[in-house]
Amino acid sequence: MRFLHTSDWHIGKSLKGRSRLDDQEAVLREVVGIARAHEVDAVLVAGDVYDSAAPSAEAQRLAVQTLLGLRGTGAEVIVIAGNHDHPRSFEAYRPLMRAAGITMVGTARRAEKGGVVPFTARGTGEPVRVALLPFLSQRYAVRAAELVTQTPAQNAAKYDQMVRDLLAALSQGFDDNAVNLVLAHLTVTGGKLGGGERLAQSIFDYYVPATAFPADAHYVALGHLHRRQTLPAPCPVEYCGSPLAVDFGEEDYVPVVRVVDAAPGVPAKGVDIPVTAGRRLRTVRGTVAELAQAAAEYGDALLRVWVREPARAGLREQVRELLPNALEVRIDPEFAAAATGSRPSRPADGQRGPSDLFHEYLGTQNIADDRVEALFAALHDETVGADRHG
C-alpha cells in the first residue's frame, strides 16, 4: 500500500505581523495534488494542523477544505493533534469528520477505543493498522508535585516510560499480516530542531528515544520537528518536516511531503516530494544601495533585511519602500560590532559636554545621523536658554 506523510501545517501562522494564509493555501492545494497524482491509499497528518489552539475562522476553513480535498482523492485521511492544536476541539470535530470519512483524534486512546485505526488499502486490498499518539503534554505525564519533589532526570524518565507504555499498549492492536504504522507528535532523542518550533514544548528534558517505537512497525510517521530527518531505529522513524518554512530559521530547508510504499513483512520505503508552492523566506544583507541594486533578484520572497550601514532616522522606511516584502529590517550584527569597535575616541569625562555624551550614546546604538545630533543640540540650546531667562 502507499501513503502520504505530512505534518506541521501551522495554518493561521503569521510572521512579523504578515498573514501567511495565502501561502498556506497554495501549499496545501499542492499537497492535495501530490496525494492525487501518486494515488495514495492514505494520508497521515502528524499534528500541528493549526498554529494556535484558537484558530481564526479563515484558518479553520482552510483546514477543513484541505482535509476534505484529501479525502476527495479516495484516500483514508487520519489526523492527530499536535502541541499547537486544541485537543478537545479535535474531539469535538471528531463526529463530523467521521461522517466525512476522516479520522481526527485529539487525545490518546486505547487501541480498541480508536487508538488504532484499521482499514483496507483501496489499491492492493492489504489490511492496515495505524496506532495514533497525539501530543502528550508533560503535565499529564509528570504531576506538579513530582516536578517539585523529584529530580529532572527522574521526571524525564517518567515521561519516557509513560510514552513507552502507551506505544506498547497501542502496538497490541497490530497484526502480523497487516501493514502496521505509528502516527505520533513528539520529540525524539537526536532530532534536530528546525527553528520555528515552540521551544517550551520541545525541550530535551521530555523526549523518547527512537527505540521506544515498536520494532514491528513498518513506519513511524512523526510530527513536531520542522526539519526533514530520519532517526536510527530498528524500524523506519521519520520526521517529514513542515511543507512551508514557518520562520527564518527554516529558510534554507527544502520543504517536502513523503510518499511511502509499505507491505506486510518488510520495512517501508519512502521518497521525499518537494513542495514548491508558497513564497520562500530569505535573509538578505547589504547597504541600501546594494539592496536596491539586487531587489529584482529577490522576487516575491518574504525578506529579513540586515542593513550594513549605520542606523539613521527613516532608514527602515527607506528599505521597506525599496523592498515591500521586507518583514524585518535591522542593522547587520556583524557590521554593528565592527562599527562599534572602530569609533574614534571622545574627550575625557571632564571635558565632555551634552552633545559629546549624546554622540557617544548614538554610537552605542550604531546610529550615525547628523540630523538627529543637530536636533538634539538645538533642543538643548533652547532648553538651556529658557532656563537662563526663566
Image: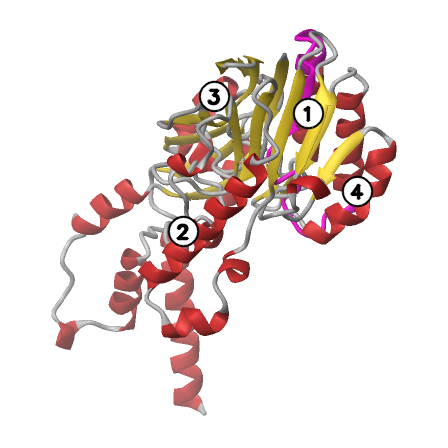
Residue 94, label in figure: 4
Label 4 and label 1: CA atoms lie apart by: 21 Å
Q: Residue at x 69, y 32 (%)?
A: 117
Label 3 and label 2: CA atoms lie apart by: 24 Å
Mark before the other along the chain sequence, 3 or 2: 2
Mark before the other along the chain sequence, 4 or 3: 4
Tag 3 secondary structure: loop
Front residue of this view, candidates 139 and 373: 139
For this view, does 147 lie left or right of residue 69? left
Quadrant location, the C terminus: bottom left
Query: Is residue 279 in view?
Result: no
Mark before the other along the chain sequence, 4 or 2: 4
Q: State yes or no: discs 2 and 1 in contact (Cβ < 8 Å).
A: no
Label 2 and label 1: CA atoms lie apart by: 29 Å
Quadrant location, the N terminus: top right
Q: Residues within 10 Å of mark 4 (few under 14, many from 20)?
A: some
Residue 203, label in figure: 2
